[in-house]
Amino acid sequence: MAMAMMVIQVMLVLATCLFPLSVEAIVRHYKFNCYMLKFMGQDLALSLHGDFVMFYIQVVMKNATKLCSIKPIVTVNGKFPGPTIYAREDDTVLVKVVNHVKYNVSIHWHGVRQVRTGWADGPAYITQCPIQPGKVYQYNFTLTGQRGTLWWHAHILWLRATVHGALVILPKFGVPYPFPKPHKEQVILLSEWWKSDTEAIINEALKSGLAPNVSDAHTINGFSGPSQGCALQEGFTVKVQPGNTYLLRIINAALNDELFFKIAGHKFTVVEVDATYTKPFKTDTIVIAPGQTTNVLITANHAAGKYLVAASPFMDAPIAVDNSTAIATLYYLGTLDSTITTLTSLPPKNATTLATSFTDNLRSLNSKKYPARVPLKIDHNLLFTVSLGINSCPTCVNGNRVVADINNVTFVMPKISLLQAHFFNIKGVFTDDFPGNPPVVYNFTGTQPTNFETTKGTRVYRLAYNSTVQLVLQDTGMIAPENHPIHLHGFNFFVVGSGQGNFNSKNDTKRFNLVDPVERNTVGVPAGGWTAIRFRADNPGVWFMHCHLEIHTTWGLKMAFVVDNGKTQNESLLPPPSDIPKC
């Protein structure tokens, strides 16, 4: 009786902490402001009949100690990584963000389609002006037809380094997974850590015109494990019961590093990427780029023991990278603490064949319930080169600065949001003349032109509602070939093909997979190669596309699609909310 009264009291505190509860069962409220209440020593998440969840959390500065050093970081609820948000397919989610830090803030719900709700997408100066210090903005969106693992993160400056967390979308009540039900689920967030302040690091790099310092460590759920010079650094532990099967929801939240992930003595069954189900396949090593998510099943098929969990870098280009390995432990319940951990061999950081084999095995489930609706008739046939360049800079160290571009356009961020300019028809903010093909055709992966200069502009590519797009993303050898994980906001797309060298429209299209290609929101363009994607422009608004290596986005490897309204109200962008931030 006392326990029941305590639960009721805590519920009343929650109900009055921020705002009245909604009686609509499918609306979930989250607030990035209040202190997280504690109940029985645990973070509190109340569920009423299993379909109305509330979290009360806060965005603040907090001192963090890692690698035997301490620094203040921007956090959600004082946590790194931030809390996991749980919802269900077709739920409406409201998240009130109150900015208590000195930086402008915005939050992107990575992979959420935001059908007609581009105002809630989050990239600063693309779909909203940032939330200024002391200001408030409520994100309001519906998880339309989506289920699986996504994530949320800051989408301004380099705040994503510490402001990020998982977004788990459960299936509708009564709808099973299309794979064996796991005994338990575990979020695995992979990230990077710098001893120094990340904003100071990128600001110094931009001032000098050079590349920023690489991170000092990789982390698994915020822990790096013992590292050179700091043997006391603890690691994360995943506890398992012998014989049980577990679903690992793996997210790469790193700023600039693609990663391998493996567990000694165990195989994974891949069942989902980027919140879309896949045909299951087994592997002992996962490769995952920044922005991507991968769900795997793992069976605790040993009687007892401790097994090394490792996240190490993948980089097959002559580019500086953090070569550290994050270490955690898979711990079988009942194992003696004195048991020696079983180790595993790590892939070489340039293990291209291993990485390519993993991505080549990914296929859409393409079942009757989860079909792969690949566009077959194409309205827009686009070829975008993604590359680096060098522009003159008299104040920089070497008289020039490193930049990045798409089709030789280094994107210039506007002063107000593109979505605002589009919706209100504000002139002079952007032009809709982004080139659909490279301005100069040459051997993109061979000998490069001597002129590395790029053009600058806030240019977008316009699409009619419901038009279909085939986009070939072509890497170049400018400065160096490099794998670019490209993220498209507002849409999922099908990865219909990829290869090495220059894309050949006559020969390579014959090898396209138009039956069961993997469906994603973030895809890697291989170093010295190309990737082809297809999607239908059935979501009106302005949608950012950029490299998810944060330094490349900072340097200008980004652009936006404008999708015009359709013929009906249900095919049109909703008006902005009344509390949309002002610039």
Image (cartoon, rainbow, N blue to C red):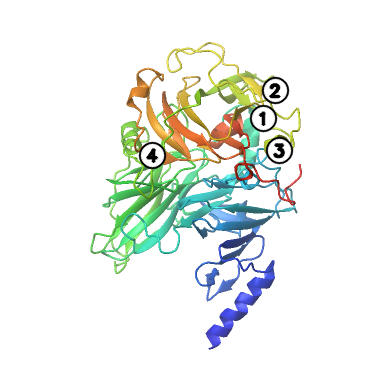
> Is 254 placed left or right of 459 in the picture?
left
Give the Cα separation between the discs numbered 2 and 1: 8 Å
Q: Secondary structure at mark 2?
A: loop
Whichever of labels 1 and 3 marks the residue nearer the N terminus, that label is: 1
Q: Is residue 486 visible?
A: no
Q: Tell me, for residue 134, which label it has, or none.
A: none
The furthest residue to the front:
568
Image spot of residue 245 (x, y percent)? 31, 60
How many C-alpha atoms fall within 10 Å of the one at disc 3: few (<14), some, or many (≥20)? some
Q: Which of pointers 1 and 3 indicates the residue nearer the eye?
A: 3
The circle on residue 518 is: 4
Residue to which mark 2 is pinned: 395
Amino acid identity at mark 2: Thr
**The residue tagged with tag 3: helix, strand or loop?**
helix
Residue 207's tag is 1
Q: How far is disc 4 from disc 3 in space, using C-alphas?
A: 33 Å
What is the three-letter code of the residue carrying label 3? Answer: Phe
Q: Residue 283 location, x and y as percent? A: 29, 45
Do the CB atoms of the residues marked 2 and 1 lie less than 8 Å apart?
A: yes
The residue to which callout 3 is attached is 423
